[in-house]
Amino acid sequence: MTMQGDDFAFEDGTKVKFWGVNICGTRPFSGEEKVRSWVRFLTKYGINSVRFHKFTWDATDGIHSTEITRENWSRFDYFCKTLQDAGVYYSWSHIYGHRLMPADSARVIAYQEVRDTKFPWSHLDGTTASLVNFAEDLQAVNIELTINMLNHVNPLTGKRYAEDPALTFIELQNEDNIYWGAMEETLKQTPTYRKILCEKFSKWLKQKYGSDEALDRAWNNKGRDKDQSIEKGNIYPNPNHGYFSYAYEQALKEDRPVEPHIADRAAFLFEEQVKFYERFIKAIRQTGYKGVIVGSCWQAGSGITHFYNLKADYDAGAIDRHNYFGGGNGHSLRPGEFNNQSMLTTPGSGLLSTGFQMVRGRPFQISEWMSLIPNEWIAEASPIIATYGLGLQGWDASFAFAVDDDNFTPTLQRGHGIYNVTSPTQLVLYPALAAMIYRGDVKEGKPFLNRNVNIEDLRKGKLGFMEKTSQQYDVKAFASVVPSAALAIGPVTVSFDDSRSMVVPQLTDFIDSTSRTITSNTGQLKWRFGESPFFTVNTSGTQGAVGFFKGETISLKDITITTNNEFAVVLVTSLDRVKGIADSEKILITTMARARNTGMQYSEDKTRLLDTGDAPILLEPVDITLVMPVKKRFKIHILDHTGHKTGKELKVKKGKVRLNGAETRAIYFLIEAGS
């Protein structure tokens, strides 16, 4: 797979989109029987790509950090070959802070300092996280691991992974960059690397200004303490996106550039990041690997550092980002306050707002996302990503987080966690959404708005427009010079050093204030906002509604839907590779609403979780009336929860049928043409 402009495409020019999932930790080293079961499970639900994530931590012998053991290679090779045979591609997100081991002690400048580091997240303890972005000795270790992996020959395919066409992209590092907020805490624990970083910055300043006196004039006598100087080599660049975001937002309020010392710090760190990526990419390309490369997938605050970081990723390859929505008490499901808003209330908010980082001329993917329990409306998430993200916005890949087993979990969460694709509110919707994506039902919109970023302006501390990121751990929200509603109209992009000036189009041309509806510039999607929000998808192959449309009559090309549910997801999908609903012999109806664990309890105002509950999961029955055109005879079969016919059918009168989930206890229904 290659990058061809904004798209992922194979070498013969065939464009491709990926509807994928993450498989993490030691799971890529599962046994053969487990792997076969897993691959059957993935393909059944329409998944065509897997992101293997943070899987090298425990894959070595505990002495050498850059060599995976023979046994683990054997299991990993089998997993990859089995995926290939099923038509599923895969990618590597193998480094999430590379964990140093004893064999590294002679090649790392301050081995014990790194080994002793403690992070707020213990899984990163003793790793190269954050420091690797400027420390060449640590970079060498990360690179060596990756090159060893690419040069490994899978005996089942006879190819090195560098030559493997099923390996779609390699990610240089997961959730890390030189502006990472945890970096300053790491530097406190690693004084040797802090000294190296200060020396690098001081050398950079000397090349630019020559002396402390010239530096003070340029910086207006700000930005360095009395004990810091170029000659001492101890000027600190403050590598923390919070530091830069605050400075940018203050400057924005006062309508001025950021202070010169802030601009210099940001520019220096950007250049260090680029040097690392260039070094890493050169080594990867020397193995013969021709596929896509991703720099990282993480944020760098608001304004100037945000766009420096985005530019570094742009130079490296495809743009990749992570985002989550909802949730409450950290990474575990436990009683307490939580966000029970629906993303539908504010068009373009939540997960979709991640698209403000899509860059013109590069593919865009979201390689980790999920709407998090105990939010009640999590079934809205995957349809939003599929229709507005991969459809209207033209995103190229999605990898939901995460599939931890080859079956549905007995509760909404796996263990105590909140990241779970194998909840029925997610994976149940995948067959319909995958068919929609692969057939290309939802068309990419016409470019709607582009914000240009001039790198030389960034060096002067200027951006030219407002762009803010707010972040609470994994959950991020983005605000731009243009309202988030633009993302419901057509593609919104960023460019670098484009000579054209930004023109903000009239959103009112696409917004009906009376009906509170935003129509996409393709005409296929409509989003009603405010009270009782929902959106509709209206293509030849997929039609339906998502959200709060109780009592509404939803009239689409070939069907009409009404529901008695407060909230529902209803998707009607052709099961033909080419034909639309009007001509297909088989049509799948997918229904989903809310779900709870047995005994799960909320406060009266639904802002606090009182009890997490236990197995089994209870599904809210969906009650809809569906009207189909009476052009031909057809039957409606009730399917079980795995998509098999139950032997029961529903009566259709003059093209009208009621699908009452309380009676059918069904999620899926199959329409078949015939007498």
Image (tube, rainbow, N blue to C red):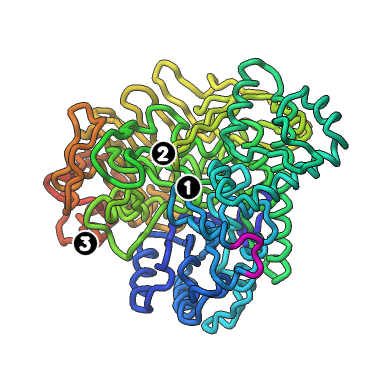
Indicate which disc residue 66 carries: none
Residue marked by disc 1: 441
Indicate which disc residue 645 carries: 3
Image x and y of residue 618, in percent: 17, 48
Task: Name the residue type under label 3.
Answer: Lys
Question: Which image quadrant: the N terminus?
Answer: bottom right
Q: CA distance from mark 2 to mark 1?
A: 10 Å
Residue located at (42% from left, 30% from top): 527
Secondary structure mostly seen in magenta is: loop
Q: Is residue 646 above or below residue 491?
A: below
Q: Is residue 49 visible?
A: no
Among the 4 quarters of the image, the one containing residue 595: top left
Tell me which segment is drawn in magenta.
106-111
Image x and y of residue 305, in percent: 64, 36
- The mark that comes first in sequence, 1 or 3, is 1
Task: Name the residue type under label 1.
Answer: Asp
Residue located at (65% from left, 15% from top): 254
- The mark that comes first in sequence, 2 or 1, is 1
Residue 135 part of the magenta segment: no
Q: Is residue 629 above or below residue 166?
A: above
Among the 4 quarters of the image, the one containing residue 606: top left
Q: CA distance from mark 1 to mark 3?
A: 26 Å
As helix, strand or loop, the secondary structure at mark 3 comes to strand
Residue marked by disc 2: 537
Residue located at (48% from left, 61% from top): 54
The one of 399 and 488 positioned closer to us in this rendering: 399
